[in-house]
């Protein structure tokens, strides 16, 4: 959001590759703060691309720029559109998703107009240890760890448990991002996602099965329900896999265990 500082650091360092991951990335918060979400994700991206364009014209600077879009741009897909391919219609249902459509299209436009070497990704649900507790998997894991540590009542508060997601470990996502800038084509867009599909409720059951604490109740918290929601996300990643050979390696059960252990350590460290 600070184009002057951004231009200064890019001119100084001239990175060969820019991974543009900076964003307001929390869907729920975007309903409360749509303007700041749009400012960060759309104007922030425009700032970055304009600066690169300026230095490219002046100094022939020509980096690869990874534009991190989101699976949320597809919105509520139809059953016959599963698995979701890159040419599926975009139907954003949250201010966050709208901002990511704009960011995605800005990346494409700067490739067409200025030949800035942008490569766009639409990453599906991914998570892992150290994930912020505003995101569903980490929220559940933190609540369970708090119950185990006797810091909370034996209740896990939830939103919509019927949403279907395809989950992936964030460490597989990082590996995918590196292969993206090494092997993929500028101007293109790629879905990246896991291969383990389940409802959010089934994911919660997996987490709870990793806990030795019995008798944990599950209660729906109306505050955790979104005004409009995306309930069916199953990606086709064949385009990306064909060009890179990438496949997810880390089982989702391992992801959940690592995440739960992270929050267990968090509460243990609080006691020291």
Image: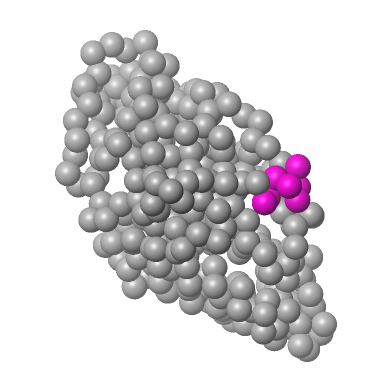
Instruction: Please provide percent x and percent y for residue 77.
Output: 40, 53
- Looking at the image, residue 187 lies above or below residue 158: below
Instruction: Please provide percent x and percent y for residue 83.
Output: 51, 45
Q: Residue furthest right?
A: 60
Q: Which residue lies furthest to the front in this view?
A: 80
Instruction: Please provide percent x and percent y for residue 74.
Output: 44, 58
Give left or right: position of 126 versus 203.
Answer: right
Q: Number of callouts in the render? A: 0
Residue 125 in sight here = no
- Of 20 and 85, the residue lying toward us: 85
Quarter where residue 159 is shown: top left
- Of 139 and 184, the residue lying toward us: 184
Give left or right: position of 84 versus 164.
Answer: right
Chief SS of the magenta region = helix
- Looking at the image, residue 68 lies above or below residue 129: below
Give left or right: position of 183 versus 133.
Answer: right
Magenta region: which residues? Answer: 239-245
* Residue occupying image coordinates x 79% and y 75%: 62
* Residue occupying image coordinates x 67% and y 84%: 113
* Residue occupying image coordinates x 34% and y 46%: 231
Colour scheme in the image?
one colour
> Quadrant where the C terminus lies?
top left
- Looking at the image, residue 158 lies above or below residue 60: above
Residue 189 in sight here = yes
Instruction: Please provide percent x and percent y for residue 196.
Output: 52, 32
* Residue occupying image coordinates x 33% and y 30%: 201
- Of 109 and 39, the residue lying toward us: 109
Is residue 45 a member of the stretch shown in magenta? no
Give left or right: position of 63 versus 267.
Answer: right
């Amino acid at each position: 959001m600070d184009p002057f500082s951004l231009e200064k650091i890019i001119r100084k360092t001239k990175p060969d590759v820019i991974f543009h991951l900076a964003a307001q990335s929390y869907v729920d918060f975007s309903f409360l703060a749509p303007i700041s979400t749009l400012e960060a994700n759309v104007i922030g991206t425009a700032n970055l691309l304009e600066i690169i364009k300026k230095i490219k014209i002046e100094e022939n600077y020509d980096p690869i720029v990874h534009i991190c879009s989101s699976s949320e741009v597809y919105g509520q897909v139809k059953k016959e559109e599963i698995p979701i391919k890159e040419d599926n219609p975009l139907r954003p249902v949250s201010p966050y998703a709208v901002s990511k459509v704009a960011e995605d299209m800005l990346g494409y436009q700067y490739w067409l107009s200025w030949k800035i070497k942008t490569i766009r990704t639409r990453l599906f649900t991914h998570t892992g240890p150290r994930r912020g507790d505003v995101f569903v998997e980490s929220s559940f894991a933190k609540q369970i760890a708090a119950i185990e540590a006797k810091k909370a009542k034996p209740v896990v508060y939830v939103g919509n448990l019927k949403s279907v997601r395809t989950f992936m470990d964030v460490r597989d996502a990082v590996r995918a991002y590196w292969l993206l800038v090494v092997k993929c084509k500028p101007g293109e867009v790629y879905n990246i996602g896991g291969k383990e599909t389940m409802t959010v409720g089934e994911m919660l059951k997996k987490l709870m099965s990793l806990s030795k604490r019995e008798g944990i109740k599950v209660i729906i918290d109306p505050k955790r329900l979104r005004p409009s929601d995306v309930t069916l996300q199953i990606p086709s990643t064949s385009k990306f896999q064909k060009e890179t050979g990438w496949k997810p390696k880390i089982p989702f059960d391992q992801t959940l265990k690592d995440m739960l252990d992270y929050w267990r350590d968090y509460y243990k460290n609080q006691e020291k």
